[in-house]
Amino acid sequence: MSTPSPLSDPLTKLAYQALQQTKGVFGLTHKTLSSRVLNAIAPMGIIAPRRDSAAKPLSPELFAKVKQRVDQLQAIDWQDAEEGIYPKELLFDHPWGDFLRFYPLVCLDSVQIWNRANQQQFQDFSPSVDTSGYPQYYVRNFHHQTDGYFSDFSANIYDLQVELLFNGSADAMRRRILAPLRTSLQAFSDVAPKAVKILDVACGTGRTLRMMRGMLPQASLYGTDLSPAYLRKANQLLSELPGELPQLTQSNAEELPYVENYFHAVTCVFLFHELPAPVRQKVFEQCFRVVKPGGSLIICDSIQMNDSPELVPVMENFAENFHEPFYRNYIQDDLSDRLCNAGFVDITEQVHFMSKYWIARKPIAAPTDNLSKQDLTHAAES
Ligand SMILES: C[S@@+](CC[C@H](N)C(=O)[O-])C[C@H]1O[C@@H](n2cnc3c(N)ncnc32)[C@H](O)[C@@H]1O
């Protein structure tokens, strides 16, 4: 456990609850107001006309369920901080300066997003963007966002856009990986804290690495992502922190540029719903390759149909309203099965608010080319 937090309770708890509530109200108000304004000006011909959408209105009962899940997420987030799994300071750690600076740009950009969404333009990039050499599935405006993942503008406003999308709960969902990460590292309790190596795949602007640095001040952290712009932003935000700077590398998660059995743990947040199914499998195989025997892969991504059937309308609306071409397949994909096929064992799942988590371990005796997984299972049975 980390050292007890200097922040006193129950004042800190109240401050945390007030902050989450304010972010929730702000996110909802932002979305309601911007959609009202855009809907009002669309008939004037200044922006693209509104396209008929198959999105369904959500019932008050469904809203109540979503609210209940947010409350549960916040309760467990607070509890983990209270128990010292991670410092309470993390609950208040936001790039406030960036949020203030970039909020007007987020508002202005909603016009471009509206136009792209209603004109069904999915590959709309500034002339300065060079998309050559990137996989085809990646060259698109995910969430209709300006320049996709290809520009500094996109990287600057991304964290705020995600916080608004989840009504201020995005970081609380990311923090759900910290408790299983800490537990999984117990397998390496004989390793000096500085020698513990953790990789965050598709690290984006570095939010998860920042949280890990808060929980594990001495660990050697690594982040990789396909987007140079997002890595530049991650470098800027992570440089503000004391301690060793995480090592950031541009790479495709399908071909991780690390030797095998290198990391004590690998994490990945909000990536798999943006990948075609065969690529998901490839990335699992790469994560398996680079994690040490006994080490774990911890994933956070969207909820899926089978574990949250009551939220299927929310998932369908997400697929309809945002440009997420692989999401419908993702919500029905059995990732535990894929992890098992990649060689992982002891696979467990958790669900919190709108996210699902997979915790999977690489066995100490990993199957080799000569000795398949089935052979090992039969050997254990006989
Ligand atoms: C939804 S964002 C999530 C970013 C970050 N993990 C977070 O929590 O905000 C998806 C990220 O995955 C990256 N990405 C998508 N496909 C990738 C691939 N094949 N290899 C590496 N990174 C990829 C994108 O550049 C982007 O930063």
Image (cartoon, helix red, strand yellow):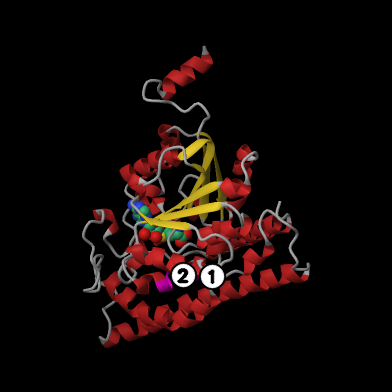
Q: Secondary structure at mark 2?
A: helix
Frontmost residue, 53 versus 229 = 229
Q: Indicate which quadrant contains ligand 1.
A: bottom left
The amino acid type, in three-letter code, at marker 1 is: Glu
305 in the magenta segment: no
Where is residue 370 drawn, in percent x and y? 37, 20
- The number of numbered badges drawn on the structure is 2
Q: Residues within 10 Å of mark 1 (few under 14, many from 20)?
A: few
Q: Residues within 10 Å of mark 2 (few under 14, many from 20)?
A: few
Which residue lies at the image location 39% right of the left edge and 56% below the top edge? 249
Which residue lies at the image location 42% right of the left edge and 73% below the top edge? 157
- Badge 1 is on which residue? 240
Which residue lies at the image location 61% right of the left edge and 54% below the top edge? 216
108 sits to left or right of 44: right
224 sits to left or right of 175: left
The amino acid type, in three-letter code, at marker 2 is: Gln
Quarter holding residue 110: bottom left
Q: Secondary structure at mark 1?
A: loop
Frontmost residue, 109 versus 197 = 197
Where is residue 179 drawn, in percent x and y? 62, 50
User: Do the numbered discs 1 and 2 sit on residues whose CB atoms are within 8 Å?
Assistant: yes
- State whether the magenta stretch is mostly helix, strand or loop: helix
- Badge 2 is on which residue? 236
